[in-house]
Image (spheres, helix red, strand yellow):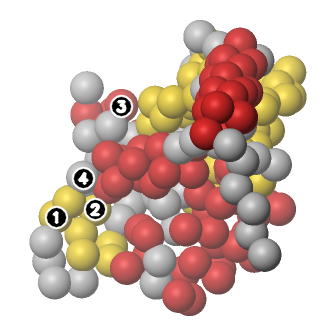
């Protein structure tokens, strides 16, 4: 048999639950785990930019092509994919000590899951040819499943950057 709490006690319990939830949210924000995606491979956490270790994603302005010939902003889609991984998650980063373009390279996790690995798994980032060899298996899997960038044609981000900088 289900018993119900008296109305006054139920309101007290509800108030305590709401207060506890508020404290948890406040503690989460104070702990500094709210991150935002800057690009498909850069996040901002506690006002500091972190370049995700071992991956490279399309840069702003880079375009890709679907099999049907449609051109799309793959940089924006990659950034959105990273935003999705960050949404509501507790994010932690461990800087490696290296820098890339005035950005601290870091191993970052959202709710304990490797952000770099997830971006490669979804196909919206590529394993860095130098540092990201540990992600090559995930990259091959995304490629064979035709996920993310692999559903069409694209230029490797490092090649696109090199070509773009020569044209300036």
Q: Give the alpha-carbon distance from disc 1 to disc 2, as whole Å.
A: 6 Å
Residue, x 43% and y 70% (percent of image)? 148
Q: Which mark is residue 64?
A: 2
Q: Secondary structure at mark 4?
A: loop
Q: Quick check: can you spot residue 51?
A: no
Is 163 situated above or below 34? below
Looking at marks 4 and 3 on the same chain, the residue that comes earlier in the sequence is marked by 4
Q: Position of residue 162 (x, y in %)?
A: 43, 40
Circle 1 SS class: strand
Left or right placement of residue 59 versus residue 140 in this view: left
Where on the picture, by quarter, is residue 14?
top right
Q: Residue at x 59, y 10 (%)?
A: 47
For marks 2 and 4 on the same chain, the one whose residue lies earlier in the sequence: 2
Asked whether residue 151 appears in the rendered view, the answer is yes
Residue 61 at x, y = what percent? 26, 40
Few, some or many residues within 10 Å of mark 4 (<14, 14–19, 20+): some
User: Which tag, 2 or 3, sits closer to the chain's start?
Assistant: 2
Can you identify the residue that label 3 sits on?
165
Of tags 4 and 3, the one toward the viewer is 4
Say which element carries label 3: helix
Q: Residue at x 65, y 80 (%)?
A: 140
Of badges 2 and 4, nearer the viewer stands 4
Q: CA distance from mark 2 to mark 4?
A: 6 Å
């Amino acid at each position: 048999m289900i018993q119900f709490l008296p109305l006054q006690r139920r309101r007290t319990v509800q108030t305590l639950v709401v207060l506890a939830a508020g404290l948890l949210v406040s503690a989460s924000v104070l702990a500094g785990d709210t991150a935002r995606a800057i690009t498909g491979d850069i996040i901002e956490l506690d006002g500091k930019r972190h370049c995700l270790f071992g991956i490279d994603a399309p840069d702003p302005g880079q375009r890709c092509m679907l099999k049907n010939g449609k051109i799309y902003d793959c940089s924006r889609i990659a950034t959105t994919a990273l935003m999705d991984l960050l949404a509501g998650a507790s994010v932690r980063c461990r800087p490696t000590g290296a820098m890339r373009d005035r950005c601290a390279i870091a191993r970052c996790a959202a709710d304990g899951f490797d952000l770099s690995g997830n971006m490669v798994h979804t196909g919206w980032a590529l394993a860095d040819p130098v540092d990201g060899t540990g992600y090559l298996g995930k990259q091959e899997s995304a490629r064979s499943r035709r996920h993310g960038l692999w559903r069409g044609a694209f230029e490797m981000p490092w090649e696109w950057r090199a070509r773009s900088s020569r044209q300036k």
